[in-house]
Amino acid sequence: MTPQMSVDLCGITLRNPILAASGTFAYGIEFARQVRFDRIGGFVVKGLSREPMAGNAPPRVWEAEGGMLNSIGLQNIGVRAFVADRLPALAKLPCAVIANVFGYAVEDYVEVVRVLEDHAGLAGYELNVSCPNTKQGGIVFSSDASLLAEVVVAVRAVARRPLIVKLSPNVTRIQPLAAAAAEAGADALSLVNTFVALAIDARARRPRLGAGFGGLSGPAIKPIALRLVYEAAQAVRIPVVGLGGIATGEDAAEFMLAGATAVQVGTASFWDPRAVERIARELERFCRRERIAQVRSLTGALKLGD
């Protein structure tokens, strides 16, 4: 039996449910020699801002037990350079290309999407709302339901393409934020972003990262990410994209069982640049072994409490 691997993510047709996560796959085209784009669902480009950003001081990455801390600082070339220099090549790829967008005020998000709307080649947008709103005293968009709704409503007003909102795990409860994003017009959610963490050099008595704190990702966060994906999927009627420590096809299946329609592979790409393609193959083999005719039947099939 050959399983049917395609899924529909809020109107975006994916060859299979496996996407490469933002911040781990550069602008995508850099992986052309490692990954067959016709064998993955797609990828999310690294975060795009209104103006170019240089990022944080080094060191920016630290390998932790069971994962990785990073403090890149959202370094990027800016949205206008992206559409001029990167998007023409990306538009020719045989998979979904999703633009990750961030800002420090609502107007920043709106302007980036407005620029992207004038160009072909993108399947949709993913809003990174794990940024402090500089106009609201540094309150992070993803931790305040009203601020989150404000930015989603504003972007929804200018975006014709599907809109995915990427939620942070650094909150007390994910359900109110998932619901706020959905009610404000999000077409899908993706979660989780990284956990705020700290690595210390005991001998030097200094942080391991130049910026001090960083974001923890990788296998260490997977059980918590699974719980948050399950809770978010239970709270909304829109699709959920799961991520957080996915390193195998069976990991991907677990996130789908928890409620995800698709998944994103992040930290695994640092250890294995071909991870996203390998995981897609492994998920198909899992479906074949388990006699699963359609991969989408996994979504939300977790038997919790039976």
Image (spheres, grey):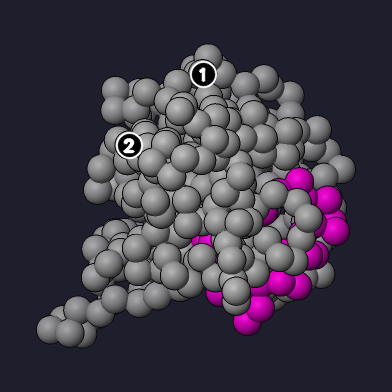
Count of residue discs: 2
Q: Secondary structure at mark 1?
A: loop
For the point 19% across and 79% down, the residue is: 201
Q: Of marks 2 and 1, which one's residue comes earlier in the chain?
A: 1
> What kind of residue is marked 2?
Arg
Q: Residues within 10 Å of mark 2 (few under 14, many from 20)?
A: some
* Residue occupied by mark 2: 278
Quadrant in the picture for residue 145: bottom right
**Tag shown at residue 235:** none
Query: Seen in the image, is 187 located left or right of residue 267?
Result: right
Estimate the spatial distance between the alpha carbons at disc 2 and disc 1, rounded to whole Å.
Answer: 17 Å
* Residue occupied by mark 1: 94
Residue 263 x, y percent position in the rendering: 52, 47
Residue 131 x, y percent position in the rendering: 60, 62
- The quadrant in which the N terminus is found is top left
Tell me if I can see residue 148 in this picture. no
Residue 222 x, y percent position in the rendering: 42, 65
> What kind of residue is marked 1?
Pro
Q: Nearer the viewer, residue 2 or 238?
A: 2
Q: Is residue 187 magenta?
A: yes
| Range of magenta residues | 168-193
Q: Is residue 102 magenta?
A: no
For the point 25% across and 79% down, the residue is: 200
Residue 26 x, y percent position in the rendering: 41, 38
Tell me if I can see residue 18 in this picture. yes
Q: Nearer the viewer, residue 299 or 293?
A: 293
Can you say whether 251 is above or below 215 in the image? above
For the point 46% across and 27% down, the residue is: 2
Q: Nearer the viewer, residue 197 or 280?
A: 280
Can you say whether 36 is above or below 99 in the image? above
Q: Residues within 10 Å of mark 1 (few under 14, many from 20)?
A: some
- The quadrant in which the C terminus is found is bottom right
